[in-house]
Amino acid sequence: GSETAHQFSEVPNACANPYLTRDTAVGLLNSQRVNVNPTAEHVPSLQSQCRYGARGDPGSVSYVFKFMLSDMFDLDKVLEQQVDFNATFANDGMTPNQIMDHPGKRAYAFLRGDRATLFVITGIKGSRDSVGRSREFVAQYHLDRPDLSEEARLDALLNQASLHMQHWTQN
């Protein structure tokens, strides 16, 4: 089925398999010495974030999965220009380097310095919030690797997001 046929009652745990595990961080950071950041948290009704850093080496990787209001990110109801503006706002006002139709329903690439950020509007509905408003499930990926090109960092994140979209839409 299509992504819009799917719904999550809770946000998946970003630090659990098949997402940002220690092994995944080791591969993405090309370092055997990684530590999970103490800011990792899982609040199933709202968001889950996981971050690893390479000990002794520059570099970090993080995933943030969260529910956001449908009024901001439902591509079937909100004008594309407004969604683009909202995605920019949700990413600290940065202008995206690329806007893509996949993975998910729409994806935004932000490339700044040694960091690549990928923001994905999955098209998967979330549970309603505490006052009954419809929510959308979004995923945000960051990779800081000074030894990789912008293209290589973005490719690594696109690969992860594509695998997650397959997992989410097949289950």
Image (tube, helix red, strand yellow):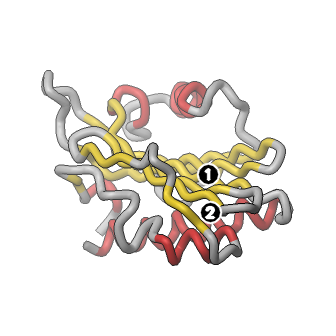
Looking at the rendered structure, the kind of residue marked 1 is His
Q: Residue at x 19, y 31 (%)?
A: 129
Q: Quadrant of residue 68?
A: top left
Vertical side of 102 occupied by 47: above or below: above
Label disc, if present, on residue 43 of the rendered structure: none
Looking at the rendered structure, the kind of residue marked 2 is Leu
Q: Residue at x 30, y 57 (%)?
A: 12
* Eye-nearest disc, 2 or 1: 1
Label disc, if present, on residue 142 of the rendered structure: 1
From the image, which quarter does the N terminus lie in?
Answer: bottom left
Residue 134 in picture, x, y percent from top left: 23, 33
Label disc, if present, on residue 157 of the rendered structure: 2
Q: Residue at x 42, y 49 (%)?
A: 40
Q: Nearer the viewer, residue 56 or 116?
A: 56
Q: As drawn, is 103 to the left or to the right of 158?
A: left
The answer to whether the residues at label 2 and label 1 have Cβ atoms under 8 Å apart is: yes
